[in-house]
Image (cartoon, grey):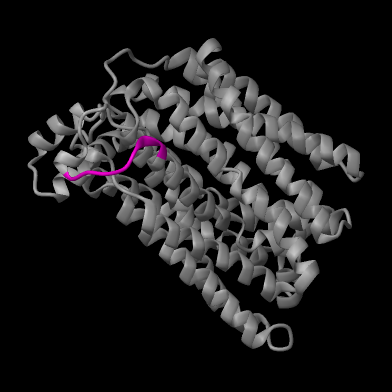
Amino acid sequence: MSEYDEDTHGVTGTPKQGLLTATVGFFAGLTTIVFYGAAGPIFEEQLALTGIFHGLLLASPHLSKAVLRIPFGAWVDEVGGRKPMLILLASTVVGIAGLVVTLFLTYPENFDMGLYPLLVLFGLLAGAGGATFSVGISQTSYWYPSDKQGFAMGAFAGIGNIGPGMVTYALPVLIGIGGLTLAYSTWLGFVVVVTVAYGLLAVNPYYFQLLDNGADETDAQETASKLGQDIFPSGNAWDSLRESATIRRTWVLVFLYTVSFGGGFTSLSAWFPTYWDLFHGFDLSTAGLLTGIFIVYGSLIRVPGGSISDRFGGENVAIVSFIVMAAGAGIMTIATGVWLALTGMMVLGTGMGIANAAVFELVPKFVPEAVGGASGWISGIGGGGTLVILPVLGYYVDFLGHIGYARGFSLFVVLSVICAGVALTLKIYDPGVSEPVEDTPVH
């Protein structure tokens, strides 16, 4: 930001402070996508869950995450990111605290299926933390000038997405040390500390601070520009959502992202601890470690995936990455040995990570008239694919028995092949349009 005098206008904060607080908030909030998955086998055994009910429990945090991402991302354009982030983190704290209190009062003797509706409610509350992505990425975008957006977005998403991987490894270790209640109490303590720290340290970008101080939009934008801010709300966040919803290509991209991310990457982030524990017989700590490797690897490979998409074209990269996904899923479908399954997991993670990047590379090309709105639908609805995929994976186990843990990956083979065909169709028959891209930040 500029050296222009901040004190004169009653504003505070720096881009680094904005990036740090948004990233830490996102890191803590996103951990709840594995709210029950990190200890999935324990919940399945203790509650005597069928595969479908187990899948629904694992999916509960993803419902609120998917529903809240779109409105909270749009709300940032009106009030800045601080208030929306605090509300989402507060909901997360309530959800985790509810589970901790329930565990303290009932576990293990009275912790049974009668508590299932309450556990789903806690999952929904905690899952609000997953919506911090759309808030944090918009908040970060407004703090940084246009020529530093790549760095800011990469740092925010790259570091923040690692959170669930850390939890899937750390939670089983804590369970081994002090039990389930202690483990979730520690998780609660971490999120509380982050929430308090965010409340104390986070400030909105200059434009929103100036509006809060009584400036009108024109004066606020002029002053913020002198301070170095050059990205501002376009004032059409809801219009962009409505317009993009009428464009067929938006929903094609939503489907692709639903398979690669919501129904793919995040579903397996929650499912893999159960898979490695109950199918391959690993203890929960090892299962968590293997899942953590998948999450961190799939998150980090998304960064070069974006560069590859820029170089070779999003359609081409999407076609290849979905074929890679199908190959990895095929390996896991037939794998009963550990090493073959590990190979399949890494191949699958490679395809999913790069496909996620490729889909967003296609947004400005296929929906240039409403980039922000299309990105909101893609990250919101596409991120909710877990709501379907996890119960279906559970049904495979109910229907086929133990081998269903492996055969369930055949679902990803079918979906990945369909997505490769869809991406090929986009390349051949619907090559996009060349129109000016709006300035709305990608949520």
Does residue 395 appear in the picture of this structure?
Answer: no
Query: Is 391 located above or below residue 307 in the figure?
Result: below
Does residue 129 appear in the picture of this structure?
Answer: yes
Q: Quadrant of the C terminus?
A: top left
**Side of 164 relative to 43 (left or right):** left
Taking the view exactly as shown, the residue that stands out farthest to the right is 337
Q: Overall secondary structure of the magenta stretch?
A: loop
Q: x%, y% of residue 33?
A: 57, 55
Query: Is 230 located above or below residue 334 in the figure?
Result: above
The residue segment tinted magenta is: 10-16
Residue at the location (53% across, 48% down)?
Answer: 385
Q: x%, y% of residue 321?
A: 64, 25
**Side of 278 relative to 161 (left or right):** right
Residue at the location (29% across, 35% down)?
Answer: 246
Which of the two residues, 405 or 25, is positioned nearer the viewer here? 25
Residue at the location (79% across, 36% down)?
Answer: 344
Q: Quadrant of the N terminus?
A: top left
**Side of 273 relative to 231 (left or right):** right
